Image: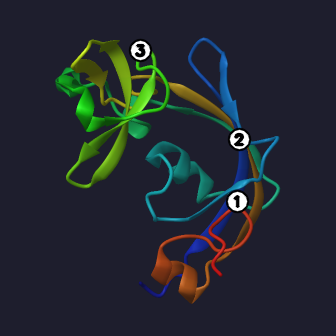
């Protein structure tokens, strides 16, 4: 770590797509928390958040390049159903987990057959321009332990026993 301390930034957000449709919000939950530079949130939003202070509110429009990237057609695949982890009946629109060398990754099922499924490994928001209405609820210096662990401790972060 350089001489500059890193901040923990906690914030609430409401996310809308390009049509103005609300996709999700943290406002009825605990605020999100991250350590600047940790790569835990999309780059376009982090760039704006690191310039803000407690109490700041703003609206940010983030392009696909600075959010979840563009859709990649090579991430549409047909795989054996036995490689998927899911609950209930597997059908189009379901979200399942696919086993990879680095663990399980979420995928969307496009079509489910008897032995194989067509899946989409793109992030559901890939290719979309997103608008965030943001309120910074807290900004503080990250502790040495938080920086070493790579995540925030306490409310909005990880609770260690």
Q: Is residue 12 above or below residue 38?
A: above
* Res. 33 mark: none
For label 3, count other residues whose C-alpha is less than 10 Å away and answer few (under 14), some (14-19) or many (20+): some
Characterize the local packing of mark 2: few (<14), some (14-19) or many (20 or more) Cα atoms within 10 angstroms.
many
Residue on which the image places disc 1: 10
- Return the x and y of residue 143 as percentages of the image width and height: 61, 84
The residue shown at (55%, 86%) is: 145
State the residue position of label 3.
91
- Pick the quarter of the image with the N terminus: bottom left
The CA span between labels 3 and 2 is: 31 Å
Instruction: Left or right? Give the position of 90 relative to 137.
Output: left
Query: Looking at the image, which residue is at 35% across and 33% down?
Result: 69
- Between 114 and 55, the one lying in front of the other is 114
Q: Earlier in the sequence, mark 3 or mark 2?
A: 2
Seen at 73% across and 61% down, the residue is 53
Q: Dot 2 corresponds to which residue? A: 13
Left-right relation of 155 to 119:
right
* Residue placed most toward the observer, 119 or 68: 119
- Which label sits in the foreground, 3 or 2? 3
> Which of these two is toward me, 6 or 106?
106
Point out the image quarter for the C terminus.
bottom right
Q: Taking 133 as reference, is 144 above or below it?
A: below
Mark 3 or 1: the one toward you:
3
Give the image quarter of residue 117. top left
- The spot of residue 157 in percent (x, y) is 65, 65
Q: How crowded is mark 1: few (under 14 residues within 10 Å), some or many (20 or more)?
A: many
Dots 3 and 1: beta carbons under 8 Å?
A: no
- What SS does tag 1 mark? strand
Q: How far apart are marks 3 and 1 (CA)?
A: 37 Å
Secondary structure state at the residue bearing disc 2: strand
Residue 52 in percent (x, y) is at: 68, 57
């Amino acid at each position: 770590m350089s001489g500059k301390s890193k901040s923990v930034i906690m914030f609430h957000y409401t996310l809308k797509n390009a049509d103005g449709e609300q996709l999700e919000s943290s406002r009825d939950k605990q605020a999100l928390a991250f350590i600047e530079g940790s790569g835990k949130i999309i780059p376009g939003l982090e760039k704006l958040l690191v310039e803000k202070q407690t109490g700041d509110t703003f609206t940010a429009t983030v392009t696909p390049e600075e959010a979840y990237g563009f859709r990649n057609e090579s991430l549409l695949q047909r795989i054996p159903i036995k490689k998927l982890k899911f609950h209930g009946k597997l059908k189009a629109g379901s979200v399942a987990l696919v086993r990879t060398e680095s663990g399980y990754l979420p995928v969307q099922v496009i079509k489910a057959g008897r032995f194989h499924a067509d899946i989409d490994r793109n992030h559901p928001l890939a290719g979309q321009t997103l608008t965030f209405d943001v309120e910074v609820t807290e900004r503080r210096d990250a502790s040495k332990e938080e920086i070493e662990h790579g995540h925030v401790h306490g409310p909005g972060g990880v609770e260690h026993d």
